[in-house]
Amino acid sequence: MKIFIDSADISEIREAARMGAVDGVTTNPSLVAKTGRKYLDVVKEICELVDGPISAEVLGISYEDILREGREWAAIHKNIVVKVPLIVEGLKAVRTLTNEGIKTNVTLCFSASQAMLAAKAGATYISPFVGRLDDISEDGMALIDQIVTIYRNYHYKTEVLVASVRHPIHVTQAATLGADVCTIPFKVIEQLAKHPLTDLGLAKFLEDAKKIPR
Ligand code: G3P
């Protein structure tokens, strides 16, 4: 499973990349707003830092606006993936962008039927939001299971990109279910590396090492 970092924070992206944990980056308007910087500037800097798919989201919601913004994003770097909301106008734009050879990430997916339409439109990635489903007492990972199964049944090429990840269990479940990609906030990437027995074991080794004659 590929790991993307779900962040617009350059220092977080740099740190995760140093761990070898970053195959790509996903951004969204909420993440970029937190930086206080212009969306274009942030994405250009990320493109210099990470050599992998970089998702940049359109802000328009009409077919024409999504298409125009998508083409503009795609023109800035070869690794750009245009992030498009899962609405009817978005699906139409994904079809056109796909025909033009532009990669897309269809975002805000909350159902298997939406995911099927994104695949038919030719999306490169589908982003089901597992955490937000869990938040309303639905089972986010059950949706991943459904989408992975449907895509396998019909050999859809669209990659399943698990988004809205909140904790390490989401990540291991995504990998177990055969998701193609998991986009993970920096805090959760750090949590993935941690285990209390590792810390305890290391403390004991360091203590015992003092007893070794030099
Ligand atoms: O990038 C989209 C997604 O990962 C958002 O996550 O935590 O805002 O639901 P969250």
Image: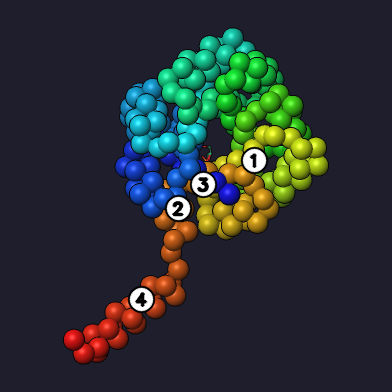
* Helix, strand or loop at mark 3: strand
Which of pointers 4 and 1 lies earlier in the amino acid sequence?
1
Which of pointers 3 and 1 lies earlier in the amino acid sequence?
3
Can residue 183 be seen here? The reply is: yes
Residue under label 1, please give it. 160
* Helix, strand or loop at mark 4: helix
Residue under label 3, please give it. 3
Badge 3 local density, few (<14 within 10 Å), some, or many (20+)?
Answer: many
Q: Is residue 26 above or below residue 80?
A: below
Which of pointers 2 and 3 lies earlier in the amino acid sequence?
3
| Placement of the C terminus among the 4 image quadrants | bottom left
* Helix, strand or loop at mark 2: helix
Which of pointers 2 and 1 lies earlier in the amino acid sequence?
1
Q: CA distance from mark 3 to mark 1?
A: 12 Å
Residue under label 4, please give it. 202
Whether residues under marks 3 and 1 lie with C-beta atoms below 8 angstroms apart, the answer is no
Residue under label 2, please give it. 189
Q: CA distance from mark 4 to mark 1?
A: 37 Å
Viewer-proximal residue, 191 or 23?
A: 23
Amino acid type, label 4: Leu
